[in-house]
Image (tube, helix red, strand yellow):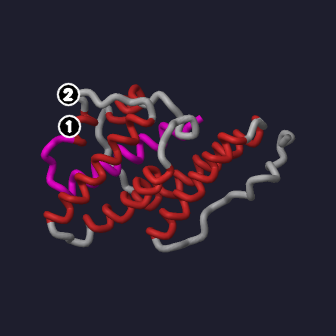
Amino acid sequence: MASKGVEPKILPQFGHIPLQDPVSLAYTVSDIVNIAISYYRITSDPGEKEYATRIIWNSINEWLEEVAPLRYIPGLVEELASMIKVKIWDADLDEKLLEEIIVDTVVFKNKVFNDTERKVLQGLADTLTAKIEELIEGLGGEIIVGTQTYDILYGNNEPSEKIQLLTTIAGIALVLATNT
């Protein structure tokens, strides 16, 4: 049992992830998040559970630094906050889905700024749309026609714009799902 003020012994000390290229960092973050979620689920010690949630939160913040800046869309945070009902460590999300969202948002956003062809970007946007939809639903959300989230996911935005908007949704959703 972890005593107050003492870091748990089972999980390693966690700080800032060492500087890496963005894609390697995204894979590292997804691995850490998935390991910490698994650990959260198997430990019965409340202190260890709390420590696992801090690791998840810190890791998502590291990822956010890579996908920043996110777009500001008035009311989107509140809309997603009303949708998301489950914390990431309690959700029944596939580890591969989390990895793909964390890595793909970094890779796809980079492609937006490297003048990738529109047709390629459209395919990437469609792929990311399906993953974000699965994430929101896995976190207890329902995507309702007429909401900003619905309009971003299924609207006819230009592909590079859509990838940036989808990254914003992913960022907000993961922050909301990891805040304690």
Q: Which residue is mark 1?
A: 151
Q: Quick one: quadrant of the C terminus?
A: top right
Q: Quick one: quadrant of the N terminus?
A: top right
Q: Nearer the viewer, residue 92 or 103?
A: 92
Rendering coords of residue 61 (x, y %): 53, 52
Q: How many marks?
A: 2
Rendering coords of residue 12 (x, y %): 74, 58
42 left or right, relative to 126: right
176 left or right, relative to 13: left
The answer to which image quadrant residue 151 occupies is: top left
Magenta segment, prevailing SS (helix, strand or loop): helix
Report the residue at 25% width, 72% height from top: 114
Vertical arrangement, residue 114 with respect to residue 166, above or below? below
Vertical arrangement, residue 175 with respect to residue 16, above or below? above
Amino acid type at circle 2 is Gly
Gap in angstroms between the C-alphas marked 1 and 2: 7 Å
Q: Secondary structure at mark 2?
A: loop
Residue stretch rendered in magenta on the structure: 154-180
At label 2, counting other C-alpha atoms closer than 10 Å, the crowd grade (few under 14, some 14-19, many 20 or more) is: few
Rendering coords of residue 47 (x, y %): 77, 39
Q: Nearer the viewer, residue 11 or 72?
A: 11
Label 1–label 2 contact, CB within 8 A: yes
Residue 168 lies in magenta, yes or no?
A: yes
Report the residue at 63% width, 49% height from top: 36
Tell me which label, 1 or 2, sits earlier in the chain.
Answer: 2
Q: Which mark is residue 146?
A: 2
Report the residue at 65% width, 46% height from top: 54
